[in-house]
């Protein structure tokens, strides 16, 4: 990434314009990408970002300028052709949508590359720039706006961002309805086909606006990755769009600065930062993240260990064998916590149940023996095979499920082994 500045101030201005262009492009892609991701249309967005290339080449051949509005029009036409071809392959040829999408976008993209290469002498369009973008040189292609020289790509990005933002604001309710329940949306009169066409047209617009910055290949990362990361972090669609824009803009800024420091491709580094953002989101996501799932598994394992100890103490009392000593590091840790929480008491090196501990232990044992009774009635298993599944399920049955199982087994008072099933607290014995 080699820029030759005229002065230190001019050098900073060039970088500022490049970063601003990348940020505007990323914001537009993130907005559109949010809806593509929630509608599970990311592959179609990928297809459009590649398949618009023939439209761009033909528009440039007709006199349009890369990044200009004539090229945007050519890209939209190519996007519509892409969608129509995919639908035709699905309805007329019986081709699955994902396969048809792959066939159409690879074919049209290849046609675009061939046209750009064959007509290289007649048009000002470098195939490598179309593929990878030229963000570093965007500040050198300017137009005068109110006496200020503004990069053409930045101006195009701002206009497209405004159009996309206004379009989404005007159709937001319909977009949300179509995204989460297209059939119901059709039933109440929402023009789902028109809404989808508008979304695909917006995809084409942000794709072409991104060409000069990151190229046809890496624009897919801007469309998909910020929205996919935001989907992990938040649950409301409006907030997902906001978070996706923030992540996209942050990646554009950080990626460009990192590329400058490392003297490498700005577009490539932006995509790398986007990937890192997604990796962080996948780790810290509050519900589906690696840390959240690990914490949930740890909490479950700890609860199971504590409940198992309570159930063992209860069974020892039931057998009148006296409370057993809690042995093993895991048992000592669980016993210490149960003692602090007031569910067991210590007598020398042995443990006994308090009233709250006995109530919880009876619930665990009741779940276990009810499930064994249900299995014994409905599943052909030997008696010695009933315990393992009941040992697992006892920690996951709620009160409503226990009552349903009790009703199905006819209110039996003992499990298949002849052991009494503890009654639910507050309910009289049968």
Image (cartoon, rainbow, N blue to C red):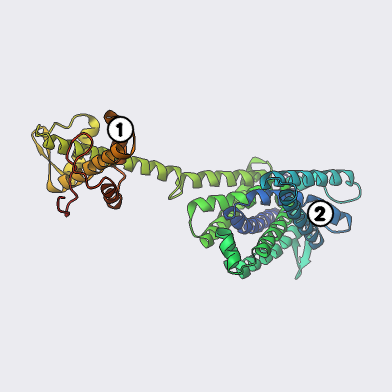
Label 1 residue SS: helix
Between tags 1 and 2, which lies in front? 1
How many numbered markers are drawn? 2
Spot occupied by residue 42 in the image (x, y as percentages of width and height): 63, 50
Camera-side residue of 229 and 138: 229
Q: Which mark is residue 55?
A: 2
Q: Residues within 10 Å of mark 2 (few under 14, many from 20)?
A: many
Number of the label disc, if any, that sits on residue 388: 1
Residue 211 drawn at (x, y percent): 74, 52
The residue nearer to you, when weighing 82 against 63, is 82
Residue 243 in the image: state x and y as whole percent.
53, 57
Q: 358 or 143: which is nearer to us?
A: 358
Compared with 273, 320 (above or below) is above
Residue 363, compared with residue 165, is above or below; it is above
Quarter-wise, where is residue 205 in the image?
bottom right
* Residue 71 tag number: none
Q: Residue furthest right?
A: 122
Q: Quadrant of the N terminus?
A: top right
Q: Secondary structure at mark 2?
A: helix
Left or right placement of residue 391 versus residue 113 in this view: left
Is there any visible trace of residue 176 in the rendered image? no
């Amino acid at each position: 990434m080699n820029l030759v500045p005229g002065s230190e101030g001019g050098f900073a201005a060039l970088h500022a314009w490049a970063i601003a262009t990348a940020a505007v492009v990323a914001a537009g892609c993130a907005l559109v990408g949010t809806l593509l991701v929630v509608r599970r249309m990311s592959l179609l967005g990928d297809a459009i970002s590649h398949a618009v290339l023939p439209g761009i080449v033909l528009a440039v051949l007709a006199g349009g300028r890369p990044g200009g509005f004539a090229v945007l029009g050519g890209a939209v036409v190519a996007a519509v052709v892409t969608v129509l071809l995919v639908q035709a392959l699905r309805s007329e040829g019986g081709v699955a949508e994902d396969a048809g999408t792959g066939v159409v976008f690879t074919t049209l993209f290849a046609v675009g590359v061939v046209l750009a290469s064959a007509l290289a002498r007649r048009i000002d369009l470098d195939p490598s720039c179309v593929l990878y973008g030229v963000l570093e040189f965007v500040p050198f292609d300017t137009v005068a706006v109110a006496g200020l020289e503004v990069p053409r790509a930045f101006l195009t990005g701002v206009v497209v961002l405004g159009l996309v933002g206004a379009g989404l604001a005007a159709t937001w309710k319909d977009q949300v309805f179509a995204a989460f329940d297209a059939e119901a949306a059709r039933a109440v009169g929402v023009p789902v086909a028109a809404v989808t066409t508008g979304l695909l047209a917006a995809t084409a617009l942000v794709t072409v606006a991104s060409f000069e910055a990151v190229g046809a290949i890496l624009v897919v990362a801007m469309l998909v990755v910020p929205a996919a990361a935001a989907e992990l972090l938040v649950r409301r669609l409006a907030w997902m769009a906001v978070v996706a824009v923030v992540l996209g803009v942050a990646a554009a800024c950080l990626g460009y600065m990192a590329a400058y420091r490392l003297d490498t491709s700005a577009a490539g580094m932006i995509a790398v930062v986007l990937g890192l953002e997604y990796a962080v989101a996948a780790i810290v996501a509050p519900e589906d993240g690696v840390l959240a799932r690990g914490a949930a598994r740890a909490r479950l394992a700890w609860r199971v260990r504590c409940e198992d100890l309570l159930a063992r103490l209860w069974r020892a009392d039931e057998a009148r064998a006296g409370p057993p000593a809690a042995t093993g590091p895991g048992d000592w840790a669980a016993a210490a916590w149960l003692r602090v929480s007031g569910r067991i008491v210590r007598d020398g090196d042995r443990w006994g149940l308090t009233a709250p501990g006995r109530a919880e232990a009876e619930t665990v044992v009741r779940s276990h023996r009810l499930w064994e009774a249900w299995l014994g009635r409905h599943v052909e298993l030997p008696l010695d095979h009933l315990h393992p599944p009941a040992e697992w399920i006892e920690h996951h049955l709620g009160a409503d499920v226990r009552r349903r199982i009790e009703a199905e087994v006819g209110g039996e008072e003992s499990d298949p082994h002849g052991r009494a099933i503890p009654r639910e607290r507050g309910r009289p014995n049968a």
